[in-house]
Amino acid sequence: MEYTLEDVKSHNTQGNAWVIVQGDVYNISSFAAMHPGGEKLILAHAGKDATELFYSYHRHEVLIKYSKLKIGRVKDSNAVVITTREKLSAVPYAEAPFWRKLPSPYYTEAHTKFRLAVREFLYNEVYAEAQKFELNGKQPTDTVYKKMGAFGLLAARIGPGPHLKMVQQLPGGIKPEEFTYFHEMIAHEEMARLNAPGYTDGLGAGLCIGLPPVLQFGPKWMKEKVAKDILSGEKRICLAITEPSGGSDVANLECTAVKSADGSHYIVNGEKKWITNGCAAHYFVVAVRTGGKGHSGVSLLLIERGEGVDTRKIKTAYSPSAGTAYVIFEDVKVPAKKFDRPRECGISMYHVQFQS
């Protein structure tokens, strides 16, 4: 059902009250008396567009909760629609001070361009799926993930560095050499605006903590092959450290990697728990015990999903969209040499031993 602004304006009294939020018309006549902030407060805006006011008090989930009150949509071309999603908001504390025209020694107009580009992309390409999947528990689709890769948003979430030159573009036309940690922070802030924490983690929380070790310590071929696969959105990665027996007590982890008799492979056995993105991951950066007790006996391996790698979904307090997994490694063979050309062996081992 469509209504004009004049239709809405005529419903502005107790027992006959409508409001507009993001271009949708809500009949709040019966709800007003139950409004937590009081009936008078909400009735003061009856017959009006309350979009900016609504988002200054509430998260978007509140609007979804009361979707049954929606009776139609405004058809007037001058109606306020989605002002807080595609543009910078003037509502106090809705944005960082710089975007409310206050001075900043850190931000420039280039940051504004970057923020708006990320915000528009997320709203147009990700928002609808985020709201749906956060509720039904499904993991982000490959389509959305690949779009994020092509847009450069995956690369933008792990800070400045050479990896930025592995992608075709960055949001807002930012050049790799101009990219700073403030751009990364903006990317995380805009991801949070999806108001779907489980789904948002499903879009690459594992990448944010799993790929940096590869970029920092991996051999050249690994950075070129694995990092490009991950940053393009073609494949996914996670960090597998936490274990059932000791939580995040890394120095006492029990997952082992033992050299084979001929020294060509490490054989990995053990379990990991609460591994974000583990259900969808193609690569696992795994903390294993290759030496004695304590942190000096711990190493990292890059393990590709394959024979002996099993992942099982864990139900979490927030949405299952994060793909949190229980990971089991059973006699997984990982090459013990760092090959210059990975095609000779499939995926080679990424091995970093911590020194005491």
Image (spheres, helix red, strand yellow):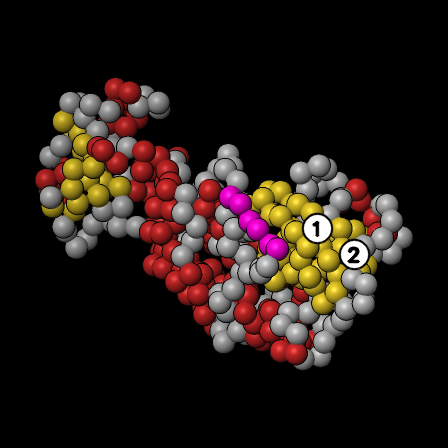
In the displayed structure image, the side of residue 260 where residue 129 appears, left or right: left
Q: With 240 as the anchor, is 6 left or right in this view?
A: left
Q: Residue furthest front?
A: 261
Is 183 rendered above or below residue 271? below
Q: Quadrant of residue 36?
A: top left
The answer to whether residue 174 is visible is no
Which one is nearer the viewer's eye here, 282 or 45?
282
Using the image as rendered, state which of residue 245 and residue 148 is in the foreground: 245
Q: Is residue 342 left or right of residue 122?
A: right
Label located before the other in sequence (2 or 1): 2
Figure check: 343 above or below 192: below
Toward the viewer: 39 or 263? 263
Look at mark 2 in the image and give the residue it sits on: 258
For the point 70% across and 50% down, the residue is 269
Q: Which portion, as a residue range, is magenta?
A: 308-313
Q: Main secondary structure of the magenta part?
A: strand
Does residue 277 appear anywhere in the picture? yes
- The reply to whether dot 2 and dot 1 touch (C-beta < 8 Å) is yes
Percent across and percent down for residue 247 are: 69, 38
The image quadrant that residue 155 belongs to is bottom right
> Which residue has dot 1 on it?
269
Residue 207 percent across, percent down from the top left: 58, 58
Spot occupied by residue 108 in the image (x, y as percentages of width and height): 54, 63
Which amino acid type is shown beneath numbered disc 2? Val
